[in-house]
Amino acid sequence: MSRPLKVQMKRLSLCLLFAYLPCLAASIRVGGIDFVDIHDLAQQYHFQQKGSVASQTITLFSQWSKLVFKEKERHCFFNNTKIYLNRPIIIRGHAMYISRSDWDNNLRPILFQKPNRLYCIVLDPGHGGRDMGCQSLREGLDEKVLTFDLAKRVQTLLLKRGYRVHLTRYNDVFVPLEDRVALAKKYNADLFLSIHFNTVPQTYVQGIETYIVPPLNEASSGRDTLIAADREYSSGIAQNPWNVLFGYCLQSTLIKSLHADDRGLKRARFKVLKEQTCPAALIECGFFSHAGELDKIKTTAYRDQIATAIVDAIGTYQQK
Ligand SMILES: [Zn+2]
């Protein structure tokens, strides 16, 4: 057996072992929520540890992974990609804790989840018809035009790799969100990706962000408190391990390939995601409201770069 193959086999067997091991870390209850000791996680999963409670930052690392936790932050970094958490990291006594739900639902899938097989990929160009999406009056650009252009570029590259690819719209028409979900089911999609660009009033904000559906009884990344919708089950929730892995592959690949600001892997109950029956993510590929980013987005060369990064991310997901 060649050395790289040996390493791969060792990694695979470790993954399979850890994927089915229950989390054995010591836990505490805070505000009715279960939190687990990060030091214990390091021991159980054979990570080395740097930093300490005194420095308010702990880094766990192995040959393949580096996780950085900071007290009070509602996110962590996995191999330098920002992953939003459901609860902030806390310190109690001499230990740092992460919520058990965050470990199980946000980090374990990136470490141990295997992808599903991909044959058919459905790309969803955001907006269309009377729904323009965001607009730049300065440049005379509509989001719906660029999402369609980008989806076509991604489709061309995926077809070359042998995937079956469908779009949720093939021209400038309005397609209701529920119809986009129904189309993914009709095509028997193995993966669904909704493509968007973003806009905010703060013109300094730029970068890439990826959204997936939150677990049951967990809030969206933008909120601290639960609302009624957070307590409703939807089929997309069952896809969580694959959603996380797919979302992580997208976010990490795009920020590195495009040298873009990392706005993180986030959670939101977007209608186009929550009723999916296959792994699904929505990607915001940059801000119309940031002059420098829009100058890049409006070029075909940059949209080709985004398309290549998306296809590379799908390739990375498939090889995990
Ligand atoms: Zn949009």
Image (cartoon, rainbow, N blue to C red):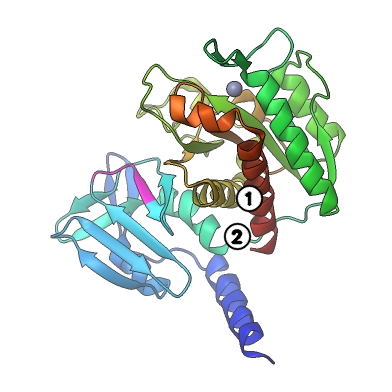
Please determine whether, in this image, residue 285 is positioned above or below residue 159. Answer: above
Cα distance in 3D space between marks 2 and 1: 7 Å
Q: Most extreme residue toward the bottom, as rendered?
A: 1
Is 265 contained in the magenta span? no
What residue do we see at 86% from left, 32% from top? Answer: 186
**Residue 286 visible in image:** no
Q: Name the residue under label 1.
A: 242
Sequence-first disc among 2 and 1: 2
- State the extent of the magenta-drawn residues as a range: 72-76
Residue position marked by numbered label 2 in the rendering: 113
Q: In this view, does 113 lie above or below 130?
A: below
Dividing the picture into quadrants, the one containing residue 65 is bottom left
Identify which residue, 75 or 169, lies in the foreground.
169
Secondary structure under tag 1 reads helix
- Helix, strand or loop at disc 2? loop
State yes or no: residue 73 in magenta: yes
Residue at image point 23% right, 49% down: 71
Q: Where is residue 305 drawn, in percent x and y?
A: 63, 44
